[in-house]
Amino acid sequence: MTDLSATSQKQITIVVPAYNEEGNVAVLRDRVAATLDPLGRYSWKMLFVDDGSRDGTLGALKRLAQEDPRVGYLSFSRNFGHQAALKAGLDEARGAAVISMDADLQHPPELLPQLLSLWEQGAEIVYTLRQDTVEVGVFKRATSRLFYRAFNALSDLDLDPGAADFRLLDRKVVEAVRQIPESGLFLRGMIHWMGFRQAALPYRVGTRHSGSSKYTFSKMLRLASDGVLSFSTKPLRMASLAGCAVSGLSGLYALYAVAMHLFNRNTISGWTSLLISVLFLGGIQLLSIGLLGEYLGRVLMESKRRPHYLISERG
Ligand code: UDP
Ligand code: MG
């Protein structure tokens, strides 16, 4: 008799971007194993993506892969960023479902059974919603809230605040993500945009196990601007609207100036209003040109069609 339980096991892959996470990868593997093995229904693999770490992450991954055949890794030639690492993981992952999570244990592995059960109930995307707790710093909470508010106002999407890159994707969705050629990838928005049957799972974010946050302020800014600029051209429209409003006002002021000149010969030329209007117009013009430049720069980067990441080692 054939062993049905072995053949009916579902194949899943867990993708984990890791940048300088040497103290976390082994702990994460242990906690994932402790959660999934007792269920017995899944044949799982972990695919770590070493995003050009400068500490011992790659060494730790090599040791882990040697002792556990369920662990695999990709190593980038340099730091390409979290979104690129996620993309690489999705490009390479096999299995009927792919789960992505952070390496620092802030995304609790104990939640995996719930993600999987929502998937088995028919959801093709299971995304998680971070319940902000004291574990998330004040600065992170404030900037994140500001970002989601701005993003939702500027784009046609409506992202849930606290959406993170901790989610399960069905094979169908993974294939769809692999088709996306754009390089300024903002996966959160993209996956929301894609549709499919989605389910949300709220969770309490954990504390980082070891090390400190790898998202520097400039990386957060980059992610935020990629997010807004790749999903909206509203900022361009706002620049033109500001241009119209300012021209309208200056038209009125011109009429006033001419009237004053005609009816009151001793007009003292208004140095203050002149200065203000010159500065104001100059400011708006520079801002609009900068905005155009941001979009144009992205068009340039897309047109180069460079690969999103380069892999130097795998195992
Ligand atoms: N990360 C990455 N490349 C980077 C920055 C971060 O792969 O350039 C990974 C990091 O190792 C972690 C995840 O992205 O697994 C989230 O980063 P982090 O925990 O530092 O962000 P935070 O939780 O502070 O938002
Ligand atoms: Mg973290």
Image (spheres, helix red, strand yellow):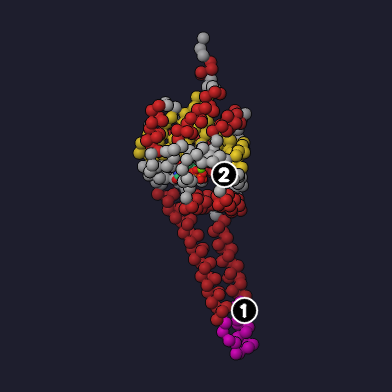
- Determine whether 295 is above or below 203 in the image: below
- Determine whether 103 is above or below 250 in the image: above
Real-space Cα separation, disc 2 to disc 1, in angstroms:
59 Å
For disc 2, the marked residue is: 135
Q: Which residues are magenta?
A: 253-270
Q: Mark 1: few, some, or many residues within 10 Å (few <14, many ≥20)?
A: few
Query: Horizontal placement of 174 versus 20: left or right?
Result: right
For disc 1, the marked residue is: 255
Query: Horizontal placement of 220 versus 132: left or right?
Result: left
Three-letter amino acid code at the position of disc 1: Leu
Decide which of tag 2 and tag 1 comes sooner along the chain.
2
Q: Mark 2: few, some, or many residues within 10 Å (few <14, many ≥20)?
A: few
Query: Horizontal placement of 132 versus 3: left or right?
Result: right
Front-lying residue, 277 or 81: 81
Residue 110 in view: yes
Extreme residue toward the top, this view: 1
Three-letter amino acid code at the position of disc 2: Glu
Percent x, y for residue 292? 49, 59
Residue 255 among those drawn in magenta: yes
Residue at the image position 60 percent from the left and 90 percent from the top? 266
Percent x, y for residue 40? 54, 22
Front-lying residue, 68 or 254: 68
Residue at the image position 56 percent from the left and 84 percent from the top? 269
Residue 65 among those drawn in magenta: no
> Which is more foreground, mark 2 or mark 1?
2
- Determine whether 201 is above or below 147 in the image: above
